[in-house]
Image (cartoon, rainbow, N blue to C red):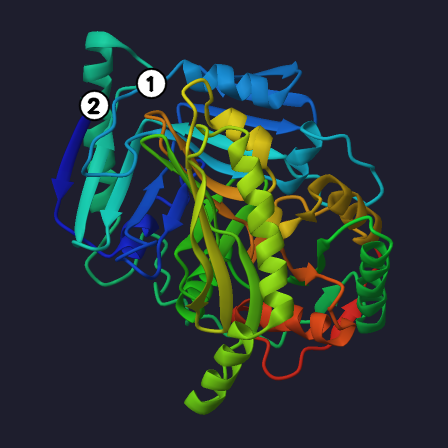
Amino acid sequence: MIITEVSYSEPVRVFESFRERPYSFFLDSGMDSERLGRYSLMGSDPFLVFRCKGGEMAVFEGGSWREQKGDPFRILRELMKRFHITGDLRIPVAAGAFGYFAYDLGRQIENLPQMAVDDLGLPDCYLGFYDRLVIWDNRHNKMFLTSTGLPEQGERAFLRARQRLDELENIVYSGIDGSGKGISGEDASGKCVVREQPKIYGHFTYDSYCAAVQRVKDYIRAGDILVANLTQRFSCRLQEKPWQLFLRLREINPAPFAAYLHYPELDIASASPERFIKINDCYIETRPIKGTRPRGRDPLEDMRLRTELLQSDKDHAELAMITNLVHRELERVCSRGSVEVPELFCLEEYPTVFHLVSTVRGELAQDKDVIDLLLAAFPGGSITGTPKIRSMDVIEELEPVKRGIYTGSIGYLGFDGNVDLSIVIRTFIIKDGTAYFQVGGGITDGSEPDAEYWETIDKARALLDALGCDGEVKVCQVLPG
């Protein structure tokens, strides 16, 4: 493995140099470099690609695709065992599997009903296996290039590592012309496109969403569930390239777990504030979010809304239930007695909202791995509910379209054992010129349907602003299928 430090450049400008290359990705820590957003990572041209839909999988390796059927988690574990490297303390990861796990991959873990329409038909899991990376240390303004030589071994691995590092250096430096533009010639600020007010489509009306909230409350009062996360999806035709949309979202709503991923079938532009799972040297951290208020129009209103959230019994109860759920899930794969909650009901500020957040930590048991952890905890409890499986049944009944990638996870499984995955919220899925985005919230017995509807609009504010929606948003209902 070779790691070299090079002269620092702005991450967006460097990613411009290879964002159109195959399976390019940018895990962009856009804020909080002292805590959650220290590192940003990018790469392209993986040596292996894994994707699955249900129990059907395809692996691209050695220049061709091979298809197989079975358990995707078992196949993924087998693939990960083939590649192992030793970590380096200067960086969070040197190589690994980067991409996404869709919410609907959970159907391979639990037997769930099939009621919602799968209108997008996207893969449930899409991972590239990358042997080289570009890494920014945002705290110290340093940039590293890594090259491992995988999938080769021994002397051939060293020769490949040197060759691939030279290629990466050429890509990084040749793509920047010194004018602040990348190879596309587009303005890196993302402000150069003139856009019309978009027409927003949804699969709920105000009335139908409120009715769905009431139906969740009926299940709660019947004793079926304690809390369920109910969401609604919007869409609109995109008037520009997905990368331009990401740049504007990044400017409006910087986030510690932002991401841009480019696939042949789709692009993903995310500004997620929520970590799903981090593993560092066998220590696990997860950070569920529950409780939201919009930012105020002035400091006085900001203070009022912040205080309101901190004093909300409903939001505290919701976060406490999800924190207990996550605690129980980690206990299934962690060393006995190691799971703890060092932070509970912490308030975090973002450009458009306030959130309540908890932190749960534990030590991964010696006989468990990241696949065991995913089987125990995926999808995240903060975007399902509790009890989890029954809440997912309710979600399937009430949400008219399948979630797909939304509320799944984006990030990496490192070949050194380190892992960092976000929860896919505040995210655009772009396919065939249409941008899809979804928002929701946890419903408890104390939820007011009207307030829950408008909370989803508050959470969508940054996404709507990035699309160019000014003022009140009018939604045109579209039925699934």
In the picture, the quarter occupied by the N terminus is top left
Task: Name the spot of residue 305 as percent of width and height, x first.
Answer: 52, 81
Task: Name the spot of residue 284 as percent of width and height, x first.
Answer: 41, 37
Asked which secondary structure carries label 1, the reply is loop
Task: Answer with left or right where residue 60 lies relative to residue 10.
Answer: right
Task: Name the spot of residue 91 as percent of width and height, x first.
Answer: 23, 38
Above/below status of 438 relative to 70: below
Amino acid type at mark 1: His
Looking at the image, which residue is at 31% across and 48% down? 40
Q: Residues within 10 Å of mark 2 (few under 14, many from 20)?
A: many
Q: Residues within 10 Å of mark 1 (few under 14, many from 20)?
A: some
Callouts 2 and 1 close, C-beta under 8 Å: no
Asked whether the viewer can see residue 427, the reply is: yes
Above/below status of 395 relative to 71: below
- For marks 2 and 1, give the CA distance: 11 Å
Asked whether the viewer can see residue 464, the reply is: no
Asked which secondary structure carries label 2, the reply is loop
Judge by depth and name the residue closer to the eye, 339 or 437.
339
Residue named by callout 2? 1
Task: Answer with left or right where residue 256 lies relative to residue 395.
Answer: left
Looking at the image, which residue is at 33% across and 49% down? 15
Amino acid type at mark 2: Met
Judge by depth and name the residue closer to the eye, 384 or 405.
384
Above/below status of 206 relative to 318: below
Looking at the image, which residue is at 42% across and 35% down? 338
Residue named by callout 1? 84
Task: Name the spot of residue 417 as percent of width and height, x first.
Answer: 36, 27
Q: Which mark is residue 333?
A: none
